[in-house]
Image (cartoon, rainbow, N blue to C red):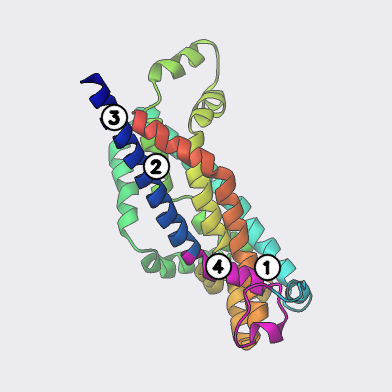
């Protein structure tokens, strides 16, 4: 009877391994199939214009060249657009810190009208951003902030969704831990910086990725608020590239690669913290 049970367990484990292998092969094949256009885009950025237009197309460049990237920075002024985009991203991370502080206030402080104010913040999530663009533009115009970097950055500093996520995560932090730090003489700012933020690393990683993507891909608002081309971002420059060099596909692939690759790198860097976030959520 025992030997029969062992045989059944062995057969079950073998079948389970085969199923895992089959699932892994199917997922790998599907991932490779989906990645082909992305891989072709990156490799095409290192091809000459004639090779990109070649029929039948080639996947691997016959001769690697950096001419397209050099052309972007010398003739398309991508260095200036990159600087503007990085300024927006850095200011967005300042906004991320402000969102974390707001979430901490809603989660751990008792004050009059706290819940009503939080519901009001949540209500703003139901309003599409396109609806508020005209009022925000008019307000900034009255403040003489149109066509300025401050006007581009200011409306995106804080967001209801980010405040909501921080508030929900910080609500799970034990109050006894914070009280112990206060009894030891720590100020509220020190409690927030040295205790709350380290505990919130998983949610900070998730919000950091979302913040970086939003800042790096900022397109519509800079296009609306800025009349001066010196304030344009990389996304706007990529749109201009498509209009001015519509027939130069190698140059467009280089611009698209320059836009996409940093997002992939940031995601790979923060991936372990995202997995940690899911692990903590599962334990709770």
Question: In the rendered view, does 15 fall on the left or right side of 273?
Answer: left
Mark 1: give few (<14), some (14-19) or many (20+) Cα within 10 Å.
many
Q: Which mark is residue 81?
A: 1
Mark 4: give few (<14), some (14-19) or many (20+) Cα within 10 Å.
some
Q: Earlier in the sequence, mark 1 or mark 2?
A: 1
42 to 105, vertically: above or below = below
Mark in the foreground, 2 or 3: 3
Mark in the foreground, 4 or 1: 4
Q: Which mark is residue 38?
A: 4
Residue assigned mark 2: 165
Q: Residue at x 37, y 45 (%)?
A: 18
Q: Nearer the viewer, residue 53 or 9?
A: 9
Q: CA distance from mark 2 to mark 4?
A: 31 Å
> Mark 1 and mark 4 in contact (Cβ < 8 Å)?
no
Q: Secondary structure at mark 2?
A: helix
**The magenta segment:** 33-60
Q: Residue at x 53, y 57 (%)?
A: 213
Mark in the foreground, 2 or 4: 4
92 to 138, vertically: above or below = above
Q: Residue at x 61, y 88 (%)?
A: 55
Q: Secondary structure at mark 4?
A: helix
Residue assigned mark 3: 7
Residue 241, visible in the rendered structure: yes
Q: CA distance from mark 1 to mark 3?
A: 66 Å
Residue 49 forms part of the magenta stretch = yes
Q: Residue at x 52, y 31 (%)?
A: 197
Residue 201 forms part of the magenta stretch = no
Question: In the rendered view, does 136 fall on the left or right side of 258?
Answer: left
């Amino acid at each position: 009877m025992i030997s029969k049970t062992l045989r059944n367990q062995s057969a079950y484990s073998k079948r389970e391994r085969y199923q895992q292998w089959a699932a892994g092969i199917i997922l790998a094949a599907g991932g490779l199939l989906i990645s082909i256009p992305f891989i072709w885009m990156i490799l095409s950025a290192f091809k000459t214009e004639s090779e990109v237009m070649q029929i039948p197309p080639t996947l691997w460049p016959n001769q690697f060249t950096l001419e397209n990237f050099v052309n972007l920075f010398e003739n398309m002024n991508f260095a200036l657009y990159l600087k503007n985009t990085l300024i927006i991203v850095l200011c967005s991370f300042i906004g991320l810190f402000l969102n974390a502080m707001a979430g901490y206030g809603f989660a751990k402080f008792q004050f009059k009208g706290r819940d009503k104010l939080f519901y009001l913040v949540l209500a703003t999530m139901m309003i599409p951003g396109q609806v508020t663009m005209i009022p925000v533009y008019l307000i900034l115009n009255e403040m003489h902030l149109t066509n300025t970097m401050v006007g581009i950055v200011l409306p995106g500093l804080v967001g209801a969704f980010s405040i909501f996520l921080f508030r929900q995560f910080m609500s799970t932090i034990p109050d006894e831990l914070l009280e112990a730090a206060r009894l030891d003489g720590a100020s509220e700012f020190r409690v927030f910086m040295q205790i709350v933020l380290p505990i919130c690393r998983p949610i900070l990683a998730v919000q950091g990725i979302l913040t970086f993507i939003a800042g790096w891909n900022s397109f519509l608002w800079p296009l609306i608020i800025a009349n001066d081309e010196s304030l344009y971002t990389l996304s706007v420059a990529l749109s201009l590239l498509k209009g001015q060099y519509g027939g130069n596909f190698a140059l467009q692939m280089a611009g698209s690669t320059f836009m996409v690759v940093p997002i992939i790198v940031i995601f790979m860097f923060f991936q372990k913290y995202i997995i940690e976030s899911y692990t903590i959520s599962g334990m709770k």
